[in-house]
Amino acid sequence: MIESLLIFWHFICTRWLPHLPAEFKLRRFLRRTVRECQHYRGIEPELKKFPLMAKRNFLAHFTDLNRHHITLEAATAAALQAERERDFLPQLPGGVSVGLSSGTSGARHVFLVDRADRCRWAGQMLASMLSTHSLLHLINPLRPPLRIAFFLRANSNLYTTVRSRRVQFSYYDLTQPFAKLLRDLKEQQPHILIAPATVLAEIANHAADHTCVTQVISVAEVLDSRDRAHIQKSYHLPVAQIYQAAEGFLGATCRHGRIHLNEDSLWIERRWINESRDRFQPIITDFSRHAQWFVRHHLTDILRPSATPCPCGSRTTSLESIEGRAEEILWCRDAAGALQPVFPDSLRQALYSMPQPLDLYRVEQHGEEWHIHLRNATPATEAAVSSALAKLLDGLQLNQPAMRFLPWSDQAPDEKQKRFRCISPPS
Ligand SMILES: [Zn+2]
């Protein structure tokens, strides 16, 4: 009961009430942090006085950086047990749930959420994502509960918090056979479909009947333009995006389709990664998390801010795109021999502008070599891919790496699907 009220409160605050200025919330948060958090005691409560926090450091001080004094070992053990037994209900003392973010290449990240976090998350998420149509459905007692299908690699108490009499929330475990999930999906007939982008595209390929679906939401992976077009065509609906990580609820699309950063809960500093200052990595301070303190966390995601204000009228930062993580940048040498980044977005554009559409693909950089895996490869597609990439690198005035075509292999279903990955940069 208290949970429902809390969720409702956060829903109303997010959707309808005027928001306090972020500067005010940040100052209040920092003053509390130096008082309550062991790790930051004695620091002057000004943002720049706090050290930048890298993941390694955060893990090293895990116990001091959470309110419930849970050790990293205890949290990791609980998370791994939940993963192994596919039972995501157990909680640690203090009503704390532990989640495991679907990190990349072994760098999985444990995070803690308590009841206050869960209710705020659920309220904010519903308030930002529910369309007016879904909201009217939800509050109309004459209609059946709103059905939400949620595909992810790991469930968590965090996500099931949205469950209620009016919301039927079903978790689809991506480690189960896909055919079974499709059968369950057909039975459930969801109104709202939430899944990683590549999974949405795969569902669109297989499920013929989408008549009940009124909202499609992509999570956890970069939504690239090709998947977006394919999904929109199949469902006759725009695809919304939720941008989330262990570091919190980072952003979501507005009704105009642009992703806005969640600056109601986050203070975001920008670390520009190129000279033209059109791409940055965010340094986030989350002033709404309760179980853990997140102050000046440096994320490796690459964000491209919009050059123009969003027509929706929101003053929060809107993004042109989320391009991916830093490990998705490939590297080539310029004429002077210096390494230059090739961004995943330009790589995708190059491959999608080929005359023949490409099936699944993956490009991995191993030093000076690019290993290219194509599903259903033919000599013609290999030649077309080579020339598309060569043309891109020519345009960027970069030297060509050696390109090797290798047989296709599926990635593990519980692994984040990455189309570009730098395993090792050229030395
Ligand atoms: Zn907008």
Image (cartoon, rainbow, N blue to C red):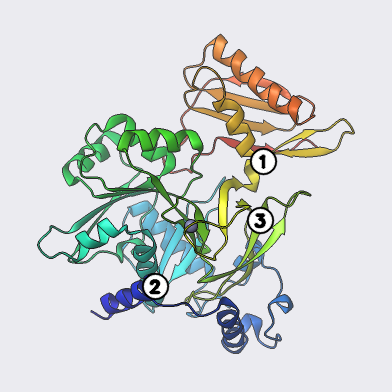
Q: Earlier in the sequence, mark 2 or mark 1?
A: 2
Disc 1 to disc 3, how far (Cα)? 13 Å
Residue reaching furthest top? Answer: 379
Residue 295 in percent (x, y) is at 62, 72
Q: Residue at x 49, y 75 (%)?
A: 288
Q: CA distance from mark 2 to mark 1?
A: 34 Å
From what the image shows, is residue 363 above or below residue 301?
above
Q: Total of numbered circles in the picture?
A: 3
Return the residue nearer the eye: 14 or 56.
14
Q: Is residue 208 placed above or below 172 in the rendered structure?
A: above
Q: Amino acid at mark 2?
A: Arg
Dot 2 beta carbon under 8 Å from ligand 1: no
The quadrant of the rendering that contains the C terminus is: top right
- On residue 329, the disc is 1
Residue 298: image quadrant is: bottom right
Name the residue tied to disc 2: 120
Residue for badge 3: 281
Neighbour tally class for label 2: few under 14, some 14-19, many 20 plus, Cα within 10 Å: many
Are the residues flagged by discs 2 and 3 in contact, CB closer than 8 Å?
no
Which SS class for mark 3? strand
Residue at the (19%, 39%) spot, across then down: 186
- Residue at 19 percent across and 64 percent down: it is 166
269 left or right of 355?
right
Q: Please name the amino acid that badge 1 sits on.
A: Ile
Q: Position of residue 370 (x, y in %)?
A: 67, 27
Helix, strand or loop at label 1? It is loop
Q: Nearer the viewer, residue 327 or 63?
A: 327
